[in-house]
Image (cartoon, helix red, strand yellow):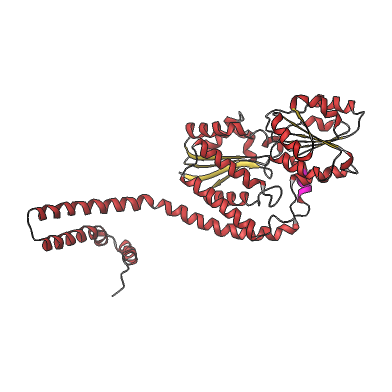
Amino acid sequence: MQLFTFGINHQTAPLAIREQVAFPAERLEPALHDLATRHAVKEAAILSTCNRTEIYCNTAQPEQAIEWMAEFHQLSREVISPYLYTLPQEQAVKHAFRVASGLDSMVLGEPQILGQMKQAVRTAETAGTLGTLLHKLFQRTFSVAKEVRTTTDIGANSVSMAAAAVRLAQRIFPSISEQTVLFIGAGEMIELCLDHFSAQHPKAITIANRTLDRAHTLARRVNANAVTLNELPDVLPRHDIVISCTASTLPILGKGMVERAIKSRKHRPIFMVDLAVPRDIEPEVGDLNDVFLYAVDDLAEIVKQGMDSRQAAANEAENIIETRVQNFMEWLHSRETVPTIRALRDHAERQRRQELERALKHLARGDDPEKVLDYLSHALTNKLMHGPTHALSNAEQEERESLEVWLRRLYHLHQE
């Protein structure tokens, strides 16, 4: 068994590929069960966000795990292979540390990924697929992320996806305060976007969600309206800006619905941002006149602006991570000696018990206790020394020299 990570992200795969291998939240636990049951995977955790799908596992057969991911999403291996990265052992550790610290994100230093990784770990714990190795890995990962964020300025001058969406809207509309905004969904990303857009004091805000209670909870924060997704065809024409991010596996806004909304608006433009993976808005919507549609990858240029101030902090973070990776690898390598240490102790324990039983019999027979103890100590010493002395006496010349060096080191013997 070995630590192994594989997946795709915004740097290796376009959105059209990423959305095909995304795991909806409700399918994560069954997926982990399926992976652990059907394949040679001892431990597993799945991190699935709008920018990445990664599987961290402890397995002797990584290729089977990769085949499983393709099969689970009903894809051929050839579809994802050009975009896939595979990271064994030390590379996997470093990758986990960098991801949690925000160094591998589209927005350098963004904090949301840490929470997403923690949720992935909680899901793996619930599924029963988080064993000793992955538990230790993620424990160290979160510790490193905390160290990076508290000792460097990696999170300074934050430029989030939500802030980027506001910037794009400001390029299209002279003033957001004159526009109406529709948010579709009620998750963490929508909350962030809601905070950024409400700070611009739009004319009106509507929140549409599958469950009305959750929509009402967010709406009360900013004095907004709350509706269900079923009401979208009616409310869409009344909004100038649409921000969508749900966990739906199918598009929520189709070309036909948006086309009817544009007609109803008498061709006044609509600015739309789709932050979901898989996408909430059909890509063909972007072909319509008077629609400005942006997906996750389209925000990359915006979020990269102003990143220079974080680069020095990123370099500091990389140095911290290099050191912490080496520390973790030392722990990992120490685990490899555990079976040998256990076998050595078991061997010594058997010898101790044999001599102890012999000594107790002599004492029960009435023998002199001092002589019994003396014999016990000699017998134990002879048995414990038999292995190394026999190996040294019967070794070839070259091997004997090496054994002698190691025996002197093990028993702290000084050259005469």
User: What is the residue that sits farthest to the left in this orientation?
Assistant: 366
Q: Decide if residue 207 is in sight here.
A: yes
Q: Is residue 72 above or below residue 202?
A: above
Quadrant housing residue 6: top right
Left or right side of 299 for 380 = left
Residue 128 at x, y percent in the picture = 49, 37
93 or 129: nearer the viewer: 129
User: What is the residue that sits farthest to the bottom in this orientation?
Assistant: 416
Left or right side of 282 for 365 = left
402 or 192: nearer the viewer: 192
Q: For the point 67% across and 49% down, which residue is it?
A: 111
386 or 161: nearer the viewer: 161
Is residue 373 shown in magenta? no
* Quadrant location of the C terminus in the rendered image: bottom left
Helix, strand or loop: magenta stretch: helix
* Quadrant location of the N terminus in the rendered image: top left
Residue 404 at x, y percent in the picture = 31, 65
Residue 248 at x, y percent in the picture = 68, 30
Q: How many marks?
A: 0
Q: Is residue 33 above or below residue 310?
A: above
Q: For the point 11% across and 52% down, which residue is it?
A: 361
Residue 288 at x, y percent in the picture = 85, 30
| Magenta region | 299-303
User: What is the residue that sits farthest to the right in this orientation?
Assistant: 266
Quadrant housing residue 405: bottom left
Q: Decide if residue 84 is in sight here.
A: no
Q: For the point 67% across and 37% down, which residue is it?
A: 18
Left or right side of 282 for 348 = left
